[in-house]
Amino acid sequence: MQTQDPIQHPPPSKTDLRQQLIQEIQHLPDDLLNEVLDFLLFTKARHLQQQEAQTSIQGKPWWEQIAGTFTNDSAYDEAMKLGREYRTP
C-alpha cells in the first residue's frame, strides 16, 4: 500500500500570523489573558537572552572562543608531546 504525500501549504505570512494571534486573543477567556501574556513575555525575554549570548560569543576571535577547550585532555597532551618529539632533531 502506497501512502500519499501530505499537501504542502506555503507558510503563512507574518501579517497572517499576527492577524491570527490577534483573533485568538480577542476570543480568549479573561481568565487566560494573564497566562498568555506571561508566556509571551517569557518567550520574548528568553529570545533576547539567547541573542545576547550569541552576540557575545560571536564577538570574540576564534582563539578566544576555543581557549581552554583541551584543558586536562590527555589525548591532546599526548598529541602535543608527539608533535614536539617529531619536530625535535
Image: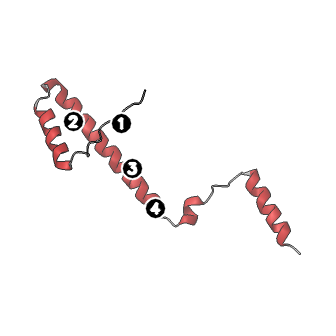
- CA gap between label 1 and label 3 equals 36 Å
The answer to whether the residue labelled 2 contacts the one labelled 4, judged by CB atoms less than 8 Å apart, is no
Q: For the residue labelled by badge 4, is the local secondary structure a helix, a strand or a loop?
A: helix
Image coordinates for residue 30, horizontal then vertical, percent: 13, 26
Identify the residue at the far bottom of this view: 89
Judging depth in this view, the residue of 4 and 11 nearest the camera is 4
Name the residue that disc number 1 marks.
5
Name the residue that disc number 4 marks.
58
Q: Residue at x 37, y 49 (%)?
A: 49
- Looking at the rendered image, the disc whose residue lies closer to the viewer, 2 or 1, is 1
Instruction: Pick whichever of labels 2 and 4 is earlier in the sequence.
Output: 2
Q: Residue at x 22, y 33 (%)?
A: 36
- CA gap between label 2 and label 1 equals 37 Å
Q: For the residue labelled by badge 1, is the local secondary structure a helix, a strand or a loop?
A: loop
Could you tell me the amino acid type at mark 1? Asp
- CA gap between label 4 and label 1 equals 40 Å
